[in-house]
Amino acid sequence: MAKILALDTSTDACSVALSLDGEIHEDFRVIPRQHTKELLPMIDALLKASSITVNDLDAIAFGRGPGSFAGIRIATGVAQGLAFGAGIALLPVSTLAALALAQHRKGYPQVVSVLDARMNEVYWGAYQEVDGLPQLIGEERVDAPANVRLPHAKSLADASSWLGAGSGWCYKEDMSSELTDAVTQIEKDVYPSAADMVRIAVADWKQGKAVAPEEALPVYLRDDVAWKKKDQQ
């Protein structure tokens, strides 16, 4: 089986995970603003505990976003650097899909993943479980909370039962009643994890979705943050 390392720094959580011989080992920590300092030591410790090196890996997965701009850049840069050095491929994984998978594994087949994007906006995507993995319905978006919408009922197995996951649900009061009435449960205090990313990455590896390091790009969804911040100064 493929040996795949995954890492994520897209939120306040920092995590690394290793899929090895069918088992997943993870180090998950909520450590705001410490990702740059802690990520490489966490990777090194996890690999040493499994008695392998980066050169033994088949691929590296990383949280490609959406999420914190700085966090996404950290994960992308570290993943690219390790992959270039070892001559291996990368597997970019959606942070929103990872959030959804965590809930699929708890028995919730339909999930609206929403992350706080700051500036009164959210990153979001709607997912339906297909063969144990999250399938995006529509597209990932950045929107005002009021614009988060459910997919059309005809594309769903059960249009009446949804779970909401992620920090963006702090804006629930600003969301439409159509959405909040359909969401039967909310898990707000959850983060994307490298363990769920590596589960997605294993499937992507089997489907030949790995890319060269220079082709593995972050996904921000919003590209005008720097300009807004400059205007606010």
Image (tube, rainbow, N blue to C red):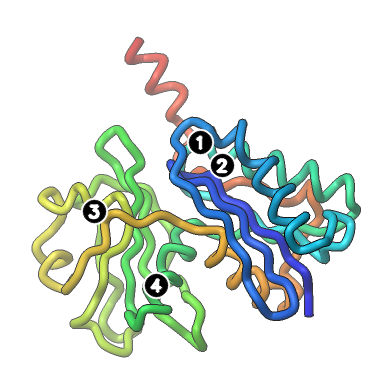
Q: Residue at x 32, y 89 (%)?
A: 157
Q: CA distance from mark 4 to mark 2?
A: 21 Å
Decide: marks 4, 2 in contact (CB < 8 A)? no
Give the amino acid type for the residue marked by disc 4 in the picture: Tyr
Q: Which residue is mark 3?
A: 169
* Disc assigned to residue 69: 1
Quarter holding residue 38: top right
Lower sequence index among marks 3 and 2? 2
Spatial CA span between label 3 and label 4? 16 Å
CB under 8 Å between callouts 2 and 1?
A: yes
Q: Which mark is residue 127?
A: 4
Give coordinates of residue 181: x percent, y percent. 10, 70
Which quadrant is the C terminus positioned in?
top left
Position of residue 223 in the picture relative to residue 185 (left or right)? right
Mark 3 crowdedness (10 Å alpha carbons): few <14, some 14-19, many ≥20 = many
The tally of labels here is 4
- Could you tell me the amino acid type at mark 3? Trp
Counting from the top left corner in percent of width and height, residue 211 is at: 77, 60
Between 23 and 83, which is closer to the camera in this rendering? Answer: 23
225 or 57, which lies in front? Answer: 57
Q: CA distance from mark 1 to mark 4?
A: 23 Å
Query: Residues under labels 3 and 2: Cα distance?
Result: 21 Å
Q: What residue sits 35% from the left and 61% below the top?
A: 113
Q: Is residue 34 above or below residue 172?
A: above
Q: Position of residue 16 (x, y in %)?
A: 61, 54
Upstream in sequence: badge 1 or badge 3: 1
The tag on residue 72 is: 2
- Alpha-carbon neighbours of circle 2 within 10 Å: few (<14), some, or many (≥20)? many
Q: Earlier in the sequence, mark 1 or mark 4?
A: 1
Type of amino acid under label 1: Phe
